[in-house]
Amino acid sequence: MLVGKKVILRPFRAGDLEGLHDLTADVRKAGEFWPLGMASEQKMLEQFEENGWWTDDCGRLLITDRAGRRLGMIIYYQASHSYQGLELGYRIFQPADRGKGLMGEAIPLVVAYLFATRHVERIQLVIESENDASCKLAETCGFTREGMLRRAHYNWGTFHDLAVYAVLRPEATPLTELLAPL
């Protein structure tokens, strides 16, 4: 587990799956920038049974508070087949929990963990350019804006530009500096 001051990140457990589909499937709560697609609960469970949503190239971390309440998740996956790097996706499940600094703590924790355990030099975020909150969050977490992918993402019935942000291994805070003391 990655234990921060406000959040705990850990791989999903079988017990976490109860009610997870309902928590993630309501597009009204996902926000305007989360991809609109839906997955069936059966497919979600089958994928979890296959590998627990955890491999070297792809994984999902549950974000909880200290009381164990499910707050959100961070996904990491291989950014491209042409270079060594990972990409992150993230989401706070309930709109009422957004804007409270939870991802501002969670993202640096997972970045530091991935640099400590994976042979990659860069981790990137690809964010709809209109998503001002996520763009600001990326910069707050030490990511540098590298460019724009014009009209690259189709969501909510229209194409959107995507801003590309990245942090390199030497720019990241070491994991030991981010973990809460025992």
Image (spheres, helix red, strand yellow):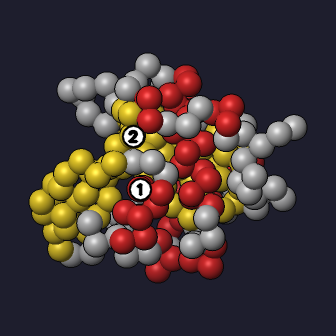
Q: Amino acid at mark 2?
A: Val
- Horizontal side of residue 120 vs 63, given as left or right: left
Graded by Cα atoms within 10 Å as few (under 14), some (14 to 19) or many (20 or more), the crowding at tag 2 reads many
Quadrant of image for the C terminus: top right
Among the two numbered marks 2 and 1 on one chain, the one whose residue lies closer to the N terminus: 1
Residue highlighted by disc 2: 167
Which residue sits at x=21%, y=75%? 157
Q: Nearer the viewer, residue 137 or 92?
A: 137
Graded by Cα atoms within 10 Å as few (under 14), some (14 to 19) or many (20 or more), the crowding at tag 1 reads some
Q: Position of residue 54 (x, y in %)?
A: 55, 33
The quadrant where residue 13 appears: top right
Q: Amino acid at mark 1?
A: Glu
Residue highlighted by disc 1: 139
Mark 2–mark 1 Cα distance, whole angstroms, equals 10 Å
* Residue 2 can be seen, yes or no: no
Seen as rendered, the residue at the extreme left is 150
* Residue 146 can be seen, yes or no: yes
